[in-house]
Amino acid sequence: MKKEDIELAEIRVFENYKIETLEAGHAVMTTEVVEHSLNYYNISHGGYLFTLCDQVGGLVAKSLGVNAVTLQANINYLKASRLGETLWVEGKAVHSGRTTQVVDVEVKNKDGKVLTKVSLTLYITGKIEEN
């Protein structure tokens, strides 16, 4: 294979999401796997799954009244998801300190099977100012 023959596929993440739950320390988002969510093997791309989890981690931080950025993440891809499958991405705060938060996120399918598990360490950049 020549490098000239390589064409990378575009990955899209936020085409059809819905925020189902947003409460203090807890967020749930649903989304459907679309063609632009897939890798070369026609299963969801790891970057797609990670981006969903990272975004939900940020929503959990916002639900606790702060802005935060990801310092560290650990991800485990346990089972594949496929085109047309609905995913449930749920994040829960397990630590909320003065400068950091730890958020655990799981991606599940409609049957409740865990597909992906992520632990995020977030750095708090400031409090959200209310208008």
Image: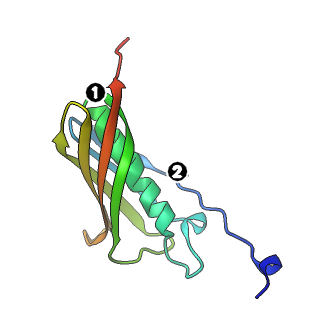
In front: 5, or 62? 5
Residue at (44, 62) in percent of width and height: 49
Q: Specify the label residue 65 is tagged with.
A: 1
Assess whether mark 2 and mark 1 are in contact (beta carbons under 8 angstroms).
no
Q: Percent x, y for residue 118?
A: 31, 60
Residue 19 visible, this angle: no
Which residue reaches farthest top?
A: 131
Q: Is residue 75 above or below residue 22?
A: below
SS at circle 2: loop
Q: Specify the label residue 47 is tagged with.
A: none
How many tags in the picture?
2
Amino acid, disc 1: Gly
Residue at (35, 56) in percent of width and height: 73
Q: Percent x, y for residue 70?
A: 38, 45
Q: Earlier in the sequence, mark 1 or mark 2?
A: 2
Q: Residue 66 falls in which quadrant of the image?
A: top left
- The residues tagged by marks 1 and 2 sit, at their Cα atoms, a distance apart of 23 Å
Q: Residue 76 falls in which quadrant of the image?
A: bottom left
Residue at (17, 43) in percent of width and height: 95
Q: Quadrant of the C terminus?
A: top left
Residue 126 visible, this angle: yes
Per the image, the residue denoted by label 2 is: 14
Q: Residues within 10 Å of mark 2 (few under 14, many from 20)?
A: some
